[in-house]
Image (tube, rainbow, N blue to C red):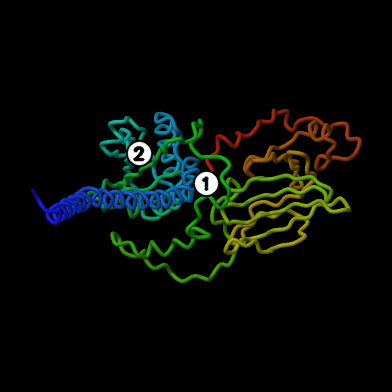
């Protein structure tokens, strides 16, 4: 028979054993589980913050993605390959490369690489490459002009590689002065979600979205000829008297078009944009019925006055060479009527200046316009000149904005 003191000691021992067992269980299982849960919570919060930052980056990049889809090659790969090849051939021809000695070869399309997990889910690639190889023979000035045109074309493309070599042997009568063998590999992108258009170049791009010219005039590239590592600098010409007569840099008329016509309580207004020199002509109808022309240029994104209140539309380039001079006759809802003193022309909104449409006397009379050289009551008014039918110019869709006429 145990004494009461022994029973008390036995009870205390049992209590201590129970407390010890509970502590061991708590530290071995419960506390470790809580720490694991705390670590998982911290990791989830960190992942949420990282996803939020990534989401903000994606939202900031969305305007760039929309612009990339707009400047992408057409969505159909076959159409994109055909139109892009034609555009490169047109650039070569405009840069004076002899097409008989040039080849433009499109290669099979190449899709962007995908991660193994994404490929297993059969996700669409973000873009598809269209690679074209160009082999041409020409001089250094032709190449510089081609590169200028290439980088001003509003497309999502780039030059992957460029190789220039001097021909080892030349055939007399066939070689060009300063001839070089040029190999260029270019790459255009078809972005997922691109416009499924039938034309190569995108429409509706603002001036801020279009590629900027590297220089105001191509005359600034003349110094490159003096750094020709293959043939050396050109021979020094005899000194002659300096001729300061303005000369054209190139034909600016294909690069100049009627962009906007507006009618409001202040009167009629039309805007003509010269993308070659970045000049803007604003035609306004005054209260006395006469049309005045204001000319602006742009400096660091700001529009600056150049000529104000001119009576005639004088199209001059950066060398002050006058390409055409017109008198504004009338501004209608979608047309501007011009005259050069000999003929009457119609310029439709969106048309370039090289597409102006000459009108016959009969068309001018039906529009209520006086044909140049005619008097009121002229019986011969309305008859076409030389009994020839008027031909309509091609629509702007057939023109290539990056192509200059030589």
Left or right of residue 336, residue 135 in this image: left
Q: Residue 223 carries which label?
A: none
Q: Mark 1 points at which residue?
A: 404
Q: In this view, does 55 lie above or below 233?
A: above
Nearer to us of marks 1 and 2 is 2
| Left/right of residue 179 with respect to residue 74 in the rendered view | left
Give the residue pinned by disc 2: 129
Left or right of 252 on screen, residue 182 = left
Q: Looking at the picture, tell me which residue is in the foreground, 186 or 180.
A: 186
| Label 1 element class | loop
Q: Which badge, 1 or 2, is on the more N-terminal residue?
A: 2
Looking at the picture, does residue 66 appear above or below residue 307?
above
In the displayed structure image, the side of residue 106 where residue 366 appears, left or right? right
- Total numbered labels: 2
**Label 1 vs label 2: CA separation?**
27 Å
Query: In the rendered image of this protein, does residue 129 appear above or below residue 210?
Result: above
- Do the residues under discs 1 and 2 have CB atoms within 8 angstroms? no
Identity of the residue drawn at 41% across and 50% down: 54
Identified at 44% across, 34% down, the residue is: 83
Residue 30 x, y percent position in the rendering: 25, 48
| Residue ranking furthest to the right | 377
Within the image, what quadrant is residue 292 found in?
A: bottom right
Residue in front for this viewpoint, 173 or 231: 231
Near mark 1 (Cα within 10 A), the count class, few <14, some 14-19 or many ≥20, is: many
Question: Where residue 32 sits in the image (x, y, percent)?
Answer: 23, 51
Q: Residue at x 48, y 36 (%)?
A: 200
Q: Circle 2 sits in a helix, a strand or a loop, which is it?
A: strand
């Amino acid at each position: 028979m145990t004494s009461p003191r022994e029973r008390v000691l036995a009870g205390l021992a049992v209590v201590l054993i129970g407390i010890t067992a509970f502590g061991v269980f708590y530290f071995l299982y419960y506390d470790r589980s809580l720490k694991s849960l705390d670590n998982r919570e911290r990791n989830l919060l960190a992942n949420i913050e990282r996803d939020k930052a990534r989401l903000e980056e994606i939202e900031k990049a969305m305007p760039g993605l929309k612009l990339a889809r707009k400047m992408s090659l057409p969505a159909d790969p076959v159409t994109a390959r055909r139109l892009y090849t034609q555009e490169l051939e047109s650039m070569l021809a405009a840069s004076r490369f002899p097409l008989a000695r040039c080849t433009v070869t499109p290669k099979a399309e190449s899709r962007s690489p995908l991660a193994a997990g994404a490929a297993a889910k059969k996700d669409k690639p973000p873009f598809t490459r269209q690679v074209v190889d160009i082999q041409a023979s020409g001089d250094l000035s032709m190449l510089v002009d081609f590169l200028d045109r290439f980088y001003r074309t509003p497309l999502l493309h780039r030059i992957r590689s460029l190789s220039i070599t001097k021909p080892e042997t030349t055939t007399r009568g066939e070689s060009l002065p300063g001839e070089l063998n040029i190999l260029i590999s270019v790459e255009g992108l078809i972005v997922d979600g691109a416009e499924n258009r039938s034309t190569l170049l995108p429409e509706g791009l603002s001036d801020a979205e279009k590629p900027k010219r590297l220089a105001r005039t191509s005359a600034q590239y003349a110094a490159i000829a003096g750094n020709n590592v293959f043939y050396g600098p050109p021979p020094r010409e005899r000194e002659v008297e300096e001729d300061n007569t303005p000369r054209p840099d190139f034909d600016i008329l294909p690069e100049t078009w009627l962009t906007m016509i507006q009618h409001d309580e202040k009167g009629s207004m039309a805007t003509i944009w010269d993308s070659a020199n970045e000049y803007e002509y604003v035609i306004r109808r005054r209260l006395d019925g006469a049309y005045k022309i204001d000319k602006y240029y742009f400096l660091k994104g700001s529009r600056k006055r150049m000529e104000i209140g001119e009576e005639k539309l004088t199209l001059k380039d950066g060398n002050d060479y006058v390409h055409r001079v017109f008198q504004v006759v009338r501004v209608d809802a979608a047309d501007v009527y011009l005259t050069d003193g000999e003929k009457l022309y119609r310029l439709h909104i969106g048309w370039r200046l090289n597409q102006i449409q000459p009108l016959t006397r009969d068309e001018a009379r039906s529009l209520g316009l006086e044909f140049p050289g005619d008097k009121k009551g002229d019986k011969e008014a309305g008859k076409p000149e030389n009994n020839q039918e008027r031909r309509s110019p091609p629509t702007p869709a057939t023109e290539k904005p990056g192509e200059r006429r030589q």
